Image (tube, helix red, strand yellow):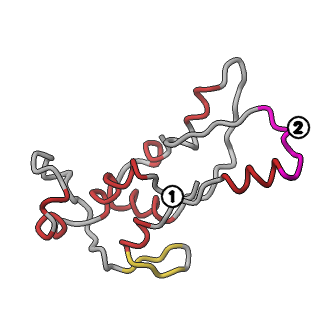
């Protein structure tokens, strides 16, 4: 898919948005959350970011709907390509690497990864999370 699922939105908000969110919307987080994790990014919702050549407010980038791969799978089914497919895995997190835990007795080489969506580049930049961890 193309972006953050609902289960990653809270972490993304805290990784990208700054402390002003804490003060402006105190009900949006648990006050027991460690201060260094609560809204630890440096951006405001109205800040403009470059998302692969498109200028967007941070809020729009964080909240943009996830585009799923269902239309692609439907096209493969309609095009009679299913005879050549021997397995599919739906990974709601760790999609680039999680699939490796479902394969036994085979060696998997993943050397042509999908491009990183702009929202994940933004999260990594502000959270300083390693790319290895970002792919999990």
16 or 87: nearer the eye?
Answer: 87
x, y percent for residue 43: 28, 71
Q: Is residue 57 left or right of residue 74?
A: left
Disc 2 versus disc 1: distance between alpha carbons? 29 Å
Q: Residue at x 51, y 43 (%)?
A: 92
| Within-10-Å neighbours for mark 1: few <14, some 14–19, many 20+ | many
Whether 44 is drawn above or below 34: the answer is below
Whether 65 is drawn above or below 38: the answer is below
Q: The residue tagged with tag 1: helix, strand or loop?
A: loop
x, y percent for residue 20: 16, 70
Judging by the rendered image, the residue that carries numbered circle 2 is 83
* Magenta stretch bounds: 78-86
Q: Residue at x 56, y 43 (%)?
A: 95
Q: Residue at x 45, y 47 (%)?
A: 134
Q: The residue tagged with tag 2: helix, strand or loop?
A: helix
Answer whether residue 79 is magenta in the image: yes
Judging by the rendered image, the residue that carries numbered circle 1 is 3
Q: Are marks 2 and 1 in contact (CB under 8 Å)?
A: no
Which disc is residue 67 wearing?
none
Whether 58 is drawn above or below 134: the answer is below
């Amino acid at each position: 898919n193309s972006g953050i699922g609902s289960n990653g939105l809270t972490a993304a908000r805290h990784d990208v948005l700054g402390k002003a969110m804490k003060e402006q919307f105190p009900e949006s987080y648990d006050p027991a959350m460690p201060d260094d994790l609560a809204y630890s990014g440096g951006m405001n919702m109205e800040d403009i970011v470059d998302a692969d050549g498109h200028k967007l407010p941070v809020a729009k980038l964080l909240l943009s709907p996830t585009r799923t791969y269902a239309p692609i799978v439907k096209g493969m089914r309609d095009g009679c390509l299913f005879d050549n497919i021997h397995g599919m895995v739906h990974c709601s997190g760790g999609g680039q690497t999680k699939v490796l835990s479902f394969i036994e007795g085979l060696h998997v080489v993943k050397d042509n990864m999908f491009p990183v969506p702009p929202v994940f580049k933004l999260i990594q930049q502000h959270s300083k999370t390693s790319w290895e961890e970002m792919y999990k």
